[in-house]
Image (cartoon, helix red, strand yellow):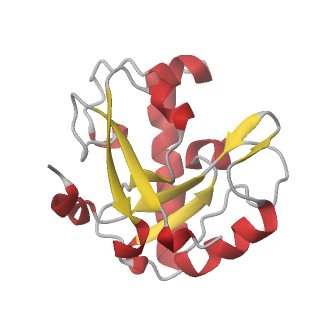
Amino acid sequence: MNIWNEFVYHYYEKRYGPLATLSSLPDEQDIKLNRLQIMKMSYKQYRLARKMIEGLLLEQFTAKGGKAKDSNPLYFTIKEQAIIKNWYEEIDYIMIPLKELPKEMISFTYGDSFITFLRGDNHPTRRKLFMANEIERVIHNHGFNIEYNNMPTYIEMQLWDSSVLYKYMA
């Protein structure tokens, strides 16, 4: 599979806009995300875990030579992912051809990064971030858009420079 011919999708809560991440919103923000109900977590628990995971993602990204301009990435999926549409009250998205994004500004996780870094199973992709030159090998070895332990596994892409989005915003 040549992922570079695919589109990536950045889903977001419409009222906050495409550049807002949960990590960038104030701690007191009253956020009701369907995703939190699905995961049986409070917003406070989610925020703490998300900040820890984003620190690990940034650490791995820079250690592998990535050039982060933002301390918190924007999240995308390769191809459209129907399951994510259930996570938002009022969803919107931006769709971008993957081949147009600068490879030094993107990274990938095999599955949602939150789950990938928190799950305790021993799948060889857990708690790992992959660079552009690594992800096709991972997909070849482990599959694309499959279910693993009754969980859908899609490829998440992290964009470490939010300014790249400006040209795609209507």
Closer to the camera in the image, 17 or 99: 99
Left or right: 161 in relation to 97: left
Q: Residue 40's spot in the image, x, y percent?
A: 60, 18
Identify the residue shown where x is 85% and y is 52%.
122
Q: Is residue 32 left or right of residue 140?
A: left
Q: Give residue 1's position: percent from left, percent from top.
A: 66, 70
Look at the picture and state if 12 lies above or below 117: above
Q: Is residue 50 above or below residue 74?
A: above
Q: Nearer the viewer, residue 134 or 2?
A: 2
- State whether residue 40 is above or below residue 51: above
Which of the 4 image quadrants contains residue 70?
Answer: bottom left
Q: Pick the residue in front: 132 or 169.
A: 169
Q: Quadrant of residue 39?
A: top right
Residue at 44% across, 60% down? 7
105 horizontally vs 157: left or right: left
Q: Quadrant of residue 68?
A: bottom left
Q: How many marks?
A: 0
Query: With 134 as the anchor, is 47 left or right in this view?
Result: left
Q: Position of residue 74 (x, y in %)?
A: 36, 53
